[in-house]
Amino acid sequence: MTELQTHSPQDLIEGIARGYAADATPPLTPELSETLRTALRGVGSDLPGDEPLDEAGVGRINDALDAFELDLGAVVGPRLDAVAPDGTLSFRQRSEAGRPLRAFGGQ
């Protein structure tokens, strides 16, 4: 599980993008990282800025990560698990049968 700390809405988007990219397979190019940030900013603009992200907000972020992966068809990465009240982000790897998902052709 990766943990990062955020203090503003911009930090939240950047932290999610960095957390995802840190464990994405294959590694993201700079262009794909920027595409990811753009997708997350679209979702982030609708999220409350001064409050910790609730379960629904985490779900919306993860939906954006799902859409990002589906558009590419060749990248697999973690999902946002929670945002603690102090701004710490935690991520979890998605898995099937106890093994991490793989890019390039699925299971």
Image (spheres, rainbow, N blue to C red):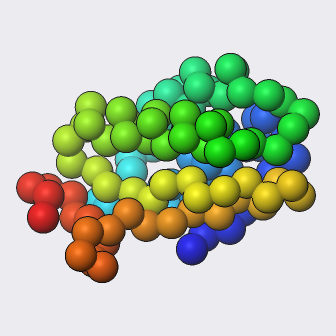
Left or right: 79, with 98 as reference point: right
Confirm whether residue 23 shows in the render.
no
Compared to residue 82, the image places residue 46 above or below, namely: above
Provide residue 27's location: percent of width, then percent of height. Answer: 36, 58
At x 53%, y 27%, the residue is 38
55 and 23: which one is in front?
Answer: 55
Compared to residue 95, the image places residue 68 above or below, namely: above
At x 58%, y 21%, the residue is 42
Compared to residue 37, the image places residue 95 above or below, namely: below
Provide residue 88's location: percent of width, then percent of height. Answer: 78, 60
84 and 32: which one is in front?
Answer: 84
Instruction: Tell me the quarter of the image containing the N terminus.
Output: bottom right
Provide residue 31's location: percent of width, then percent of height. Answer: 42, 36
At x 76%, y 35%, the residue is 10
Provide residue 15's location: percent of width, then percent of height. Answer: 67, 50
Instruction: Tell me the quarter of the image containing the C terminus.
Output: bottom left
